[in-house]
Image (tube, coloured by chain):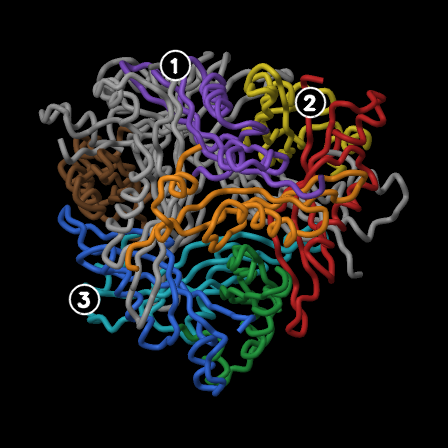
Chain colours: A red, B orange, C green, D purple, E blue, H yellow, I cyan, J brown
Amino acid sequence: MSHHVYKQIELTGTSPDSLEDAIQTAVTRAGKTLRNLRWFNVTDIRGYIEGGQVAHWQVSLKLGFTLDDIDTTDEADTALLEPS
Amino acid sequence: MSHHVYKQIELTGTSPDSLEDAIQTAVTRAGKTLRNLRWFNVTDIRGYIEGGQVAHWQVSLKLGFTLDDIDTTDEADTALLEPS
Amino acid sequence: MSHHVYKQIELTGTSPDSLEDAIQTAVTRAGKTLRNLRWFNVTDIRGYIEGGQVAHWQVSLKLGFTLDDIDTTDEADTALLEPS
Amino acid sequence: MSHHVYKQIELTGTSPDSLEDAIQTAVTRAGKTLRNLRWFNVTDIRGYIEGGQVAHWQVSLKLGFTLDDIDTTDEADTALLEPS
Amino acid sequence: MSHHVYKQIELTGTSPDSLEDAIQTAVTRAGKTLRNLRWFNVTDIRGYIEGGQVAHWQVSLKLGFTLDDIDTTDEADTALLEPS
Amino acid sequence: MSHHVYKQIELTGTSPDSLEDAIQTAVTRAGKTLRNLRWFNVTDIRGYIEGGQVAHWQVSLKLGFTLDDIDTTDEADTALLEPS
Amino acid sequence: MSHHVYKQIELTGTSPDSLEDAIQTAVTRAGKTLRNLRWFNVTDIRGYIEGGQVAHWQVSLKLGFTLDDIDTTDEADTALLEPS
Amino acid sequence: MSHHVYKQIELTGTSPDSLEDAIQTAVTRAGKTLRNLRWFNVTDIRGYIEGGQVAHWQVSLKLGFTLDDIDTTDEADTALLEPS
Amino acid sequence: MSHHVYKQIELTGTSPDSLEDAIQTAVTRAGKTLRNLRWFNVTDIRGYIEGGQVAHWQVSLKLGFTLDDIDTTDEADTALLEPS
Amino acid sequence: MSHHVYKQIELTGTSPDSLEDAIQTAVTRAGKTLRNLRWFNVTDIRGYIEGGQVAHWQVSLKLGFTLDDIDTTDEADTALLEPS
Amino acid sequence: MSHHVYKQIELTGTSPDSLEDAIQTAVTRAGKTLRNLRWFNVTDIRGYIEGGQVAHWQVSLKLGFTLDDIDTTDEADTALLEPS
Amino acid sequence: MSHHVYKQIELTGTSPDSLEDAIQTAVTRAGKTLRNLRWFNVTDIRGYIEGGQVAHWQVSLKLGFTLDDIDTTDEADTALLEPS
């Protein structure tokens, strides 16, 4: 309990609707393969303009999740830390 | 009129609904004890995730308010400036 | 096609309603005189407080637009690049 | 439960012994008058040198504490938010 | 009244006398072609040295001015937004 | 003597005259209710423009002061904070 | 089409020849296992010196790639998002 | 030998004891699945407070490891680069 | 000679060949309508990837040029800008 | 003429009078042993407070000077580059 | 007494033991040839990893020392300011 | 072996040809009087424009070199650390 490790990855979510929706889009996508998502912090807010209108809101964020209380089967472990 | 002094404090407001609501939450709370709130500027945007959804939007902001045209009663003055 | 030039200007849009609306306000205004707006990125988020409420959301952003495929008439060119 | 407000203040703690002790010194001092201290984040690490030795470790940190679930007596309220 | 747009340009003013004079030099020059100048914020302070003396104080600043309540004649509009 | 705690607050002082005067304005105001002011460091330099002239110089600064009850011999007190 | 998610990873490429080659080295390596690489942005430029000459150019960069239009087979999905 | 590629991931290690232990906790966890760890650099120092004491030291760091001299079996390659 | 004003604009130049060519592309484009270009400083280095190769190098830069009517003797002109 | 090298050192000048005087103090001191001082840029503005007044203005700056057109006698060369 | 000049140099100290020891290592080394060391501030914290363990703690710091009250013999003066 | 000290100095190299050549120019110059150069990291990329062309590429960089394994003769020691 006293020694935890978290990992942070950086995603960019987009949405035609709002900043909140762009963030939730990234969180939802990450949640498909990552358990234990805990927090995010925004690192960049951008957007794409078409015809004088904001067409896509683009929010980059760091997503933090716990690494320490996972199952220690090789498979699960690989899924969470290995890569990238 | 020519010599003003403003003070800035840093709060973090949260909301389950939106970034704007998280900011207004902090502004409202500050307004309970501080008169003369003038402006804010955002310093950090974070959030807490539960079950793959953004559960709380957390916005840190600096809040600026005027110090110079306050009543000079000791009590009020203390309320505004005194250190913690 | 292989050599492009983009220019970035910095505007601040405001709105009594939301952060998104403040951004769109700036984009709309820029679109009145600038063709080829392509993207924006937020540089600052502030607001003005009146009566304990956020009265105006103020978002500063850099607006990027293409310079390379413009008409080369002096007038248009001046409109886009000339310094102030 | 859904709308929280935290306040952050900035202190500098010093110690002749270690960085951790300098931080704890600031936390301990803050705890004398502030309830509900929750977290800190370091903003600056400095030190004072005497006779070629580090005489004092100086760590500046932001201290965050909850404002929302306090008693609403004027006294308590003043103690937590008012001050600087 | 509720939707405003401001533009920021970046100038560097110089002076042989002082930092304040260098800033005012830039503000004065901008005022020749731009109406509605509202604020500045300093982004860089430099200087040129000759013979061991500071020969020129050089201050870079962003200058903000209103775009929204201008006359909509093409000429005025060009003067305010077009440029740089 | 070996464990000190300092607090930093952020003020903005203004003046129609100079940057130094704007800073001193903030320092003077803080001194009305805070003992043991020790140092400041500038975080932002801005100004308000009226009629093409700088009408107000606005300097934001962090003000540091002692919170602990150290021995008040001039020598010891000076030896610890001075630097930096 | 309206909701996209991108991921950014951070690599450092090196080359004995040039900054461009160091960047391309990282991009080439990433392309071996990652489809849909879209952009990079440089975060750090360093180098290693041997015998008074720059022996290796070292460029750190963030690499962005699309996550949203991938095949949804478990295998492919794991390869792109899972890890680290 | 002349073209190397390194990857950096961002972890947060915690410890009830010290900053060094928090860092080593993250390094140890990463070492379970990543070979060739080479260096780290600290990006954030935070902590959690309970009962007026620092209960957990939290240090975020970027961890760099070599990608280029790995075995090119699919399995190993996937373990190091693929993901995220 | 003693009071100069420079203006800085921000452009992004691209090139399929090199970072230097991307910068020169922006400088050349600016030179079509701006006299007195004096210096640039790079603010961002990015690139677009196609088929695992860097297809476009994108360099954002601030371009500085003189706004004032200074004496155009080569000597004086050089003496003022050179540095920095 | 086509290959120049400049060196930058960082000094802090102080003055009881003004920011400009603090800067000139540092420049004057550097000029005692360094030829070819060319420019400075300010990195920090601080001050020391005594009795509620700014007692010392403290300005940190980087000082740039030319290394390339020096006499190549060992002695002069050592004086300019060697150390630190 | 009223006009002081300090110089700052940047060193990196390493230690197999702790962050504090790495800092003290740099301070001790500087003290061999520099009198009047006054303060340091940390600019970077890194480390080298061997066999999954932190083998060296590496702390970069700026070291400040007084230049103004030194003996004005050429030799001493050279030792303190000249170089670099 | 276990306690090392490195020093970093900041130079600006220029070249009419390329960014790499500007960096090598600074490294070469430093190598004339400094042994044990180890690495550099770029802090600023600028250039001087003449006649619409980039006339000089100017790259500022920090140069790191070892201090610990030098000969301890006074002369050599002075040459490496003393100055500035």
Q: x, y percentage for residue B84?
A: 44, 32
Characterize the local packing of mark 1: few (<14), some (14-19) or many (20 or more) Cα atoms within 10 angstroms: some
From where the camera sits, is residue E58 visible?
A: yes
Q: Which residue does the numbered mark 1 point to in the structure image?
A: D16
In this rendering, do the residues under marks 1 and 2 share a single chain? Answer: no
Q: Is residue H48 above or below residue J47?
A: above
Q: CA distance from mark 1 to mark 3?
A: 55 Å
Q: Secondary structure at mark 3?
A: loop
Amino acid type at mark 1: Pro
Q: x, y percentage for residue J48?
A: 26, 35
Characterize the local packing of mark 3: few (<14), some (14-19) or many (20 or more) Cα atoms within 10 angstroms: few
Disc 3 sits on a residue from what chain? I
Q: Residue at x 70, y 59 (%)?
A: A18
Q: x, y percentage for residue A20?
A: 70, 53
Q: Nearer the viewer, mark 2 or mark 3?
A: 2
Q: Check the picture and name the quadrant holding the N terminus of chain I.
A: bottom left
Q: Secondary structure at mark 2?
A: loop
Q: Which residue does the numbered mark 2 point to in the structure image?
A: A4
Q: Residue at x 61, y 64 (%)?
A: C39
Amino acid type at mark 2: His
Disc 2 sits on a residue from what chain? A
Q: Which residue does the numbered mark 3 point to in the structure image?
A: I1
- In which quadrant of the rendered view does residue H54 lie? top right
Q: Residue at x 60, y 34 (%)?
A: D70
In this view, the residue in front, H15 or E4, is: E4
